[in-house]
Amino acid sequence: MPRDARLEQDFYTRADTLRVARELLGKRLVVPDDDDGRRVSGRIVEVEAYLGVEDRAAHSFGGRRTRRTETMYAVGGTAYVFFVYGMHHQFNVVTGPEGLPHAVLVRAVEPDEGIELMRERRPVSKERELTSGPGKLCRALGIDLGYDGEDLTRGTRVWVEETGVSFGADEIASGARIGVAYAGEDALNPWRFWVRGNVYVSKKG
């Protein structure tokens, strides 16, 4: 599979966000280093889907529009990055047509390229801790609020590539999303998807 075989906009703009989320597994998230252009990347192994105005766990629930959430209303294929707990960035891809505020959070990646630079940014004693969580992967890949609103299909700062890797239904697990207990019954929706057996998945089960 050639490098920079980035996903095109029609991958993201489909109305079925759960399908987009599952099909992101195995794709490569690429964030070139600004200093020397080296590729830093990881294969996506865990995601969570957030389904907009009717999903109590989504930032856009009830049609909420704030300075932070406005990016969710962009056309599919836009990066949505936010800051939580005063310390962590989280990287999402917007899905669906413009005005439908759905997004998929990338929760974990398996390091692929630029691993030494990842280690410099995020020194860890165990390799699996490098990118096994949404805040961890953002630190390792150098993603911050400056990436919010980036065009994943035409931009040069961050994108997602095809790898030729796909997973069968028996290779993908699903379960409740993490850290959204405030969402009541919606917290139980099995909209987290991960690659079975991958050591970089943030939380098993």
Image (tube, grey):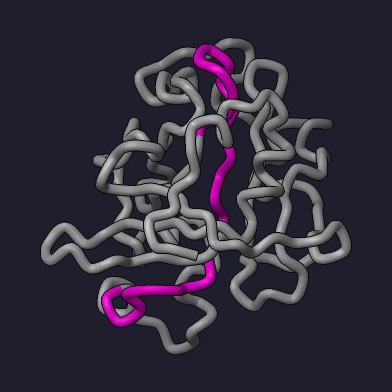
| Residue lying furthest right | 170
| Residue lying furthest front | 2
Residue 20 place in picture, x, y as percent:
66, 39
Query: 199 or 113, which is in the foreground?
Result: 113
Query: 138 or 78, which is in the foreground?
Result: 78
Queried whether the magenta region covers residue 184, the answer comes back as: no
Queried whether the magenta region covers residue 114, the answer comes back as: yes
In the image: residue 128, left or right of residue 45: left
Residue 139 place in picture, x, y as percent:
35, 62
Q: Within the image, what quadrant is residue 114 found in?
A: bottom left
Residue 129 place in picture, x, y as percent:
50, 77
Image vertical order of residue 48 relative to residue 34, above or below: above
In the image: residue 184, left or right of residue 52: right
| Residue lying furthest bottom | 125
Image vertical order of residue 77 relative to residue 141, above or below: above
The magenta-colored residue range is: 94-117
Q: Within the image, what quadrant is residue 102 found in?
A: top right
Q: Name the image quarter holding the C terminus.
A: bottom right
Residue 41 place in picture, x, y as percent:
40, 65
Query: 123 or 167, which is in the foreground?
Result: 167
Point 25% across, 46% down: residue: 156
